[in-house]
Structure formats: C-alpha cells, structure tokens
Image (cartoon, rainbow, N blue to C red):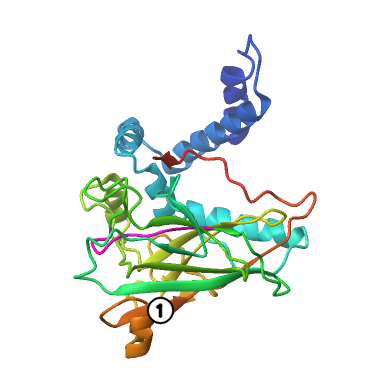
C-alpha cells in the first residue's frame, strides 16, 4: 500500500466506525501512530512473526515494569527534554539550571524538613563515603528563594533504589528539603553509585540487540519547585565516573556535572559530627520565574507513592 491507501484504511477502521462519543485528541494520536506503523511495516517488510514478537516484548516489558526504563534507554525521555528546551526558547524563556530526565524511580511522600536532612539510614555508613550535598536555590538574577522545595533521591552502594529494592528501609536516600531563610539546603547522605539495567531484563534485551550497554554514571535526582517559579526536573552526574559522558539514558548535560571534593580537615570533620573524612558536592539551582502562556513544566505521569 502507498501512504494514501494506508491513511484511507486507517480512517475507515478507526474513524468511520465510531458510534459513540469520541475523544478527538486520542483519535488524532491513534490514527497518526497507527498509520505510521502501517507505513513502517510496508517500508521494512516487517513479517507477521516479527510483529507478534514485538507485541509480546511490550507485554513482557509492561509486566516487568520496565517501560519507563526503556523510554530512557532509547532516548525518548531525552528527546522530550530537547523538545521542551526548544519550546522554552520559542517562548522567550532562557537561563536557569538545565533540565534533564526524571527517570522511572521517583517515589512521592518522602520525609520533609527545613534546611537540612540526613537521607541515609546508616546501614551503609561503614562501607561507603559520607557525602554532604549543599547549595542554594535562587532565581535567574541570583535572588535567594527561601522555602523552595528540593526533592532529592539516589541509589545506594549497590545501585539500587529504596521502595523498588525491598531490602532497604522506607525512603532510604529520599528526602524533601525546604530551603532555609538564606535559600540554602544541605543533605547528608552516602556517595551514590551508578547502576546497570537488570542483565536479564527487557530493556537490556533490546540494548543487547543494538550493541549498547545499559549503564548509568553515579548521579543524584532532583525536583525543585517554589510558588511563582517553573518546576525543575534535573539531576547531576558526578565527575570521574567512567560513564559520565556515556550514559545509556543520555541524561548528562553541560551544567549538570558535579565534582565530589574530599574533606579531611579534622576541624571540619568534627563540625559535621563525623569521625572520618567525607566528600562534599556543591549544587546550586536557579529557577525560572513562571510566565503566562509558557509551556508547562508539570508532567502528568504515573509515579510510585509510599
């Protein structure tokens, strides 16, 4: 079939057959994607066996709860960020900390505090470095923003996330910190490590077919929000990781690389209430003021909640 014949067929099957109320947006998207799929079947001569294997794959990926991981691994989530950047530019929105992918591992409801929070439960304090993450939240002119909500989450020393990893305590390495009167936040935690896709999982299965690895560098995720400002979804990746610029999820961006500094000064160690050297990362965030008619930065998607 040529494209005109395909479009006619899809319309006959999915538009002309409607007898009830129609969600026109859903109809528009389904018709377009179905027609594009039919065209791909024609262009690539996709066999029936290949098509059904593809449908079986999506069934398996859904049952494994890996579709969110697949979206990151194939670059779909990064592509959406690039589109959002372009939409901002067209709306005249510039500056601020760069956005990057959310990933599939956020959990709502993390404990909230003001100014400071200890994120880890202490279970790994004897086998991984303590890390202090500190910074300020400002607007793009450098004005401090008190009471901004800084939501932070990251993996443990094995590259696993609490809630999804049932061996960890509730909300381990997940916190919400409201900036203090000086717009500052401090998180005491442990050094995150990168992770790889489950080796036998559905995402790695596809990556293997593409000759790609499924590894991420060590990183820390952020949501940052404040009344009157555009919500920021971002993360920093840590300098020195072998996958820093080879992130399978394409999340590393200029302006989002942080350096962990070793602190061995005894007075500073004592001031922090520790008995051994630690690491410190500074990550300041600049939020953009909300503007009327600007593209929304809120993404409506299913997220875990504990």
Q: Can residue 245 be seen by looking at this rendering?
A: no
Is residue 151 located in the magenta-colored stretch of the structure?
yes
Quadrant of residue 191 within the rendered picture? bottom left
Vertical arrangement, residue 27 with respect to residue 225, above or below: above
Say how many tags the image has.
1
Q: Judge whether residue 155 is colored magenta.
A: yes
Q: Main secondary structure of the magenta part?
A: loop
Nearest the camera: 69 or 209? 69
Residue pointed to by mark 1:
280
Q: Is residue 228 left or right of residue 254?
A: right
Question: Considering only vertical position in the picture, is 142 above or below 76?
Answer: below
At mark 1, the secondary structure is strand
Residue 94 higher or lower than 22, as above or below: below
- Single out the residue that lies furthest toward the right: 292
Tell me which residue sits at (57%, 63%) in the image. 179
Horizontal and vertical percent for residue 186?
A: 47, 69
Asked whether 55 or 119 is in front, the reply is 119
Disc 1 crowd rating (10 Å Cα; few below 14, some 14-19, many 20+) is: some
Q: Which residues are magenta?
A: 150-159
> Residue 202 placed where, x, y %?
28, 45
Residue 255 vs residue 123, the one in the foreground: 123
Q: Nearer the viewer, residue 204 or 100?
A: 100
On the question of residue 52 being in view, the answer is yes
Left or right: where does residue 40 sit relative to residue 173?
right
The residue that appears at 58% across and 71% down in the rendered structure is 136
Q: Position of residue 59 (x, y in %)?
A: 33, 32
Percent coordinates x, y for residue 181 in the rendering: 63, 67
């Amino acid at each position: 079939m040529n494209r005109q014949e395909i479009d006619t067929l899809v319309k006959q099957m999915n538009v002309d057959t409607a007898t009830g109320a129609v969600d026109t947006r859903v109809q528009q998207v389904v018709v377009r994607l179905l027609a594009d799929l039919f065209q791909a079947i024609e262009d690539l001569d996709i066999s029936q066996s290949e098509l059904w294997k593809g449908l079986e794959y999506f069934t398996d990926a859904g049952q494994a709860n890996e579709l969110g991981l697949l979206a990151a691994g194939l670059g779909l989530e990064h592509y959406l960020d690039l589109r959002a950047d372009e939409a901002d530019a067209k709306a005249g929105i510039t500056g601020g900390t760069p956005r990057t992918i959310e990933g599939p591992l956020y959990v709502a409801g993390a404990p909230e505090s003001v100014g400071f929070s200890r994120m880890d439960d202490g279970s790994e304090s004897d086998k991984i470095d303590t890390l202090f993450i500190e910074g300020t939240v400002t607007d793009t002119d450098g004005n401090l923003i008190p009471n901004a909500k800084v939501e932070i989450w990251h993996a443990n020393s094995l590259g696993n996330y609490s809630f999804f990893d049932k061996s960890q305590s509730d909300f381990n390495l997940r916190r919400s910190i409201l900036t203090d009167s000086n717009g500052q936040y401090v998180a005491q935690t442990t050094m995150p490590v990168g992770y790889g896709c489950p080796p036998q999982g559905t995402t790695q299965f596809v990556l293997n077919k593409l000759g790609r690895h499924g590894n991420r560098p060590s990183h820390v995720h952020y949501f940052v929000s404040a009344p009157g400002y555009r919500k920021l979804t971002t993360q920093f990746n840590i300098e020195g990781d072998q996958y820093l610029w080879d992130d399978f999820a394409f999340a590393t961006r200029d302006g989002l690389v942080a350096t962990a500094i070793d602190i061995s000064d005894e007075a500073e160690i004592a001031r922090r209430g520790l008995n051994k050297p630690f690491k410190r990362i500074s990550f300041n965030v600049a939020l953009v003021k909300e503007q009327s008619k600007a593209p929304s930065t809120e993404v409506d998607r299913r997220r875990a909640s504990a």
